[in-house]
């Protein structure tokens, strides 16, 4: 599958550490290592961005580490946290992408800037060696919606398998970091079924996970197109039934989004939270993606909280190295 995709170099320009203007990441600088993502999840909204690369291409910002170093040298005040992967995944399975990711994270950590990321990728061992030196500066989230192979093959066919993602959790545990799990997007009647949820939480509790964030699927016009092109007729019909009567509305930075009907989400969240509780796991509802419901402090909000609590790092006037 990988051979069908091209990773091409693209020069990153401008300032990097500018605060994001949206949702729970507001005020925190956000960085993407690539434009586009090899994983190509069926529900990915970033695939529909106007600046997204052409089909089967991913643009790698190869100059990003150098640009970042220069910017850090110029700035007197540095942010305390940076979020990676707002529209891509920095652990896409490609050596050049992983190299730029490693260099970028290393620069940030060496300047005591915390790094938060969400990934569905496989994190190579040498990253854990780096993370182990900066435990309190790493806030990882693993994206994992279901252990079902059928779901994985239909909705996330380009990503590493759920089992491979679970190995990341074990590696994090070995260095004393407990990642959070992002269960997003929950697909109604597919991944929110009692037995599926039980299976997932049983496994997560065995791995010592204590916290997850939940969000049901969102629809945007381009995701709808992807569903039509990539899902089986049965799943297309299911999506149509879920969203048919819903209005397009503004949610976060998107002006045209449909939410799963509120009663389905309310009941689903309640049921999933109850199952999580039985396994000793705290499940939070993502407030940004559920503006009409009472949400919780999810991990992204926690980065914002930490950023506000801890003042940005003041750089000494004269620096070594
Ligand atoms: S991993 Fe994230 S960025 Fe990559 S395709 Fe999937 S949803 Fe999009």
Image (tube, rainbow, N blue to C red):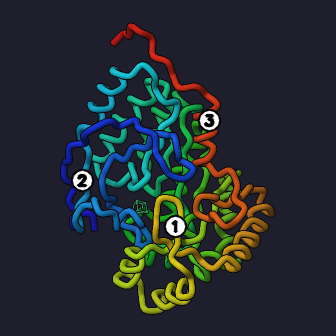
Q: Disc 3 or 2, which lies upstream in sequence?
A: 2
Q: Residue at x 70, y 79 (%)?
A: 263
Q: Quadrant of residue 203?
A: bottom right
The CB of the residue at mark 1 lies under 8 Å from ligand 1: no
Answer whether labels 3 and 2 touch (C-beta < 8 Å). no
**Mark seen at residue 59:** 2
| Residue 152 coordinates in the image, percent (x, y) | 47, 72
Q: Quick check: 47 left or right of 5? A: right
Crowding near pointer 2: few (<14 within 10 Å), some, many (20+)? many
Q: State the mark number for residue 250.
A: 1
Q: Nearer the viewer, residue 280 or 295?
A: 295
Q: Which residue is mark 3?
A: 306
Quarter residue 286 falls in: bottom right
Q: Position of residue 234 (x, y in %)?
A: 48, 91
Of the numbered discs 3 and 1, the one sitting upstream in the chain is 1
Residue located at (38% from left, 29% from top): 107
Q: Is residue 69 in sight in this rendering?
A: yes
Which dot, 3 or 2, sits closer to the camera?
Answer: 3
């Amino acid at each position: 599958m990988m051979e069908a995709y091209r990773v091409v170099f693209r020069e990153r320009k401008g300032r990097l550490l500018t605060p994001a203007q949206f949702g729970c990441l507001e005020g925190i600088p956000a960085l993407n290592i690539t434009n586009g993502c090899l994983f190509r999840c069926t529900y990915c909204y970033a695939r529909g961005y106007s600046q997204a690369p052409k089909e089967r291409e991913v643009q790698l910002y190869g100059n990003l580490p150098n640009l970042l170093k220069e910017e850090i040298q110029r700035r007197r005040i540095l942010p305390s946290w940076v979020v990676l992967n707002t529209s891509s995944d920095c652990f896409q399975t490609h050596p050049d992408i992983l190299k730029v990711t490693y260099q970028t994270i290393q620069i940030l950590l060496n300047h005591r800037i915390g790094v938060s990321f969400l990934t569905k990728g496989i994190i190579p061992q040498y990253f854990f060696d780096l993370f182990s030196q900066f435990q309190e500066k790493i806030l990882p989230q693993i994206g994992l919606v279901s252990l079902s192979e059928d779901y994985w093959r239909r909705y996330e066919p380009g990503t590493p398998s759920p089992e491979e993602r679970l190995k990341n959790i074990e590696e994090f545990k070995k260095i004393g970091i407990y990642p959070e799990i992002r269960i997003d997007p929950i697909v109604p009647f597919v991944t929110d079924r009692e037995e599926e949820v039980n299976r997932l939480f049983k496994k997560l509790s065995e791995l010592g996970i204590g916290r997850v964030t939940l969000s049901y699927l969102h629809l945007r016009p381009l995701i709808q197109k992807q569903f039509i092109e990539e899902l089986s007729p049965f799943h297309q019909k299911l999506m149509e039934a879920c969203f048919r009567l819903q209005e397009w509305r503004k949610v976060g930075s998107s002006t045209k989004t449909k939410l799963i009907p509120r009663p389905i989400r309310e009941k689903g969240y309640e049921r999933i939270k109850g199952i999580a509780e039985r396994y000793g796991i705290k499940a939070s509802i993502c407030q940004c993606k559920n503006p009409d419901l009472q949400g919780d402090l999810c991990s992204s909000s926690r980065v914002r909280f930490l950023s506000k609590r801890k003042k940005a790092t003041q750089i000494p006037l004269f620096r070594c190295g």
